[in-house]
Image (cartoon, rainbow, N blue to C red):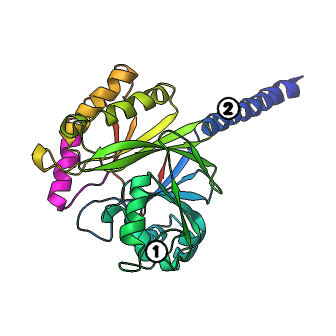
Amino acid sequence: MRINIKVMPFKFSRLLVLCLSLALSAGAQTKKSAFYIVPLGIKGGIDESNLSAYMVGATGSNGYICLDAGTLHYGIEKAIGKHTFKVSAEKVLKQYIKGYFISHAHLDHVSGLIINSPEDSTKNIYGLASCLETLKTHYFTWESWANFTDEGQKPQLKKYSYKPMEPKKPVTVDGTGLTVQVFPLSHSNLTGAAYLVKSNDAYLLYLGDTGPDEVEKSTRLRELWQAVAPLINKEQLKAIMIEVSYPNEQPDKSLFGHLTPNWLMKEMSVLESYTGTGKLKNFNLIVTHVKPPEKNIRKLMQQLKQQNSFGLNLIFPQQGKAIRL
């Protein structure tokens, strides 16, 4: 009996440890990240080595979409240097990226796509019809560049296929497990785009360049916030990726369809009017398209932190460094 008395607590403690381990493991699995984001370029402006482009994949998958494509090769090399990818840059470009979703056709969002097209593999370019028309008539022409697409000037090299998107109508990207919806945005004199990416029951919202509704004389941001608010309340939207190009000192007449910390926080107030007070606390907000010089970038980052009355989890991406959400 004495032996049994000593052994039983030992067995019980082992059982307790096992149960706790299983519980912790289950908890870790329920909190497993849904998205793996690789910033290939994070800035707007004059730094051609670091312009807007974000690879997004479902966690555990090597199939990615690329949200904008201002910088590709240099960003992929930076990611390899930071051990984000452990394969060649050629493999990432040709095999990992399954398609491009372009928010608008300004050069800082498409130059990497154009320059890298001779070395790329066959895939689709998605976007609003107006955006794809600009690519067709101004970039992939034999006057400015070879036509690597299946439309426009002949000869058509047929490496890329244009895939016009209709607002809010989901498209599925083969090889990624992702579906994507597009929402129009106002960007000065043209229509930009936001993309809502879905993986299983999780979502990620990426906005291309956009100005505030009040300055743009638009309701497009309000309509977008109204659409995604229920996903925030259900904790399905993992993050919003949104531009802040200038510090607050930039006058409204010189925004050219961009945001400042002041205007971003005003837009967050509109979003909170749909989610309910306090629902944005600890919500992930990834700040994109910051514009040099560096002193301005530091200033706008400081302003964002100071004005963050919502308790948002502000994330400032680094080129080549993965973000798990």
Compared across the picture, whether 40 is left or right of 120 comes to: left
Q: 225 or 269: nearer the eye?
A: 225
Amino acid on which the number 1 mark rests in the picture = Gln
Counting from the top left corner in percent of width and height, residue 82 is at 45, 67
Give the residue at mark 1: 153
Q: Residue at x 35, y 61 (%)?
A: 109
Q: 324 or 18: nearer the eye?
A: 324
* Residue reaching furthest to the right: 1
Q: Is residue 249 visible?
A: no
Give the residue at mark 2: 23
Using a 10 Å C-alpha cutoff, classify the residue at mark 2 as few (fewer than 14 neighbours), some (14 to 19) or many (20 or more): few
Question: How far separated are the C-alphas under marks 2 and 1?
Answer: 61 Å
Counting from the top left corner in percent of width and height, residue 273 is at 33, 21
Main SS class of the magenta portion in the image: helix
Residue 274 falls in which quadrant of the image?
Answer: top left
Q: Is residue 81 visible?
A: yes
Counting from the top left corner in percent of width and height, residue 120 is at 53, 74
Compared across the picture, whether 136 is left or right of 216 comes to: right
User: Dot 2: what SS?
Assistant: helix
**Residue 138: in magenta span:** no
Counting from the top left corner in percent of width and height, residue 283 is at 40, 34
User: Dot 1: what SS?
Assistant: loop
Amino acid on which the number 2 mark rests in the picture = Ala
Q: Tell me if residue 267 comes above or below residue 186 in the rendering.
A: above
Q: Which mark is residue 72?
A: none
Q: Tell me if residue 263 comes above or below residue 292 in the rendering.
A: above
Using a 10 Å C-alpha cutoff, classify the residue at mark 1 as few (fewer than 14 neighbours), some (14 to 19) or many (20 or more): some
Q: Earlier in the sequence, mark 2 or mark 1?
A: 2
Residue 194 falls in which quadrant of the image?
Answer: top left
Instruction: Please report the bounds of the magenta region as a residue range.
Output: 288-304
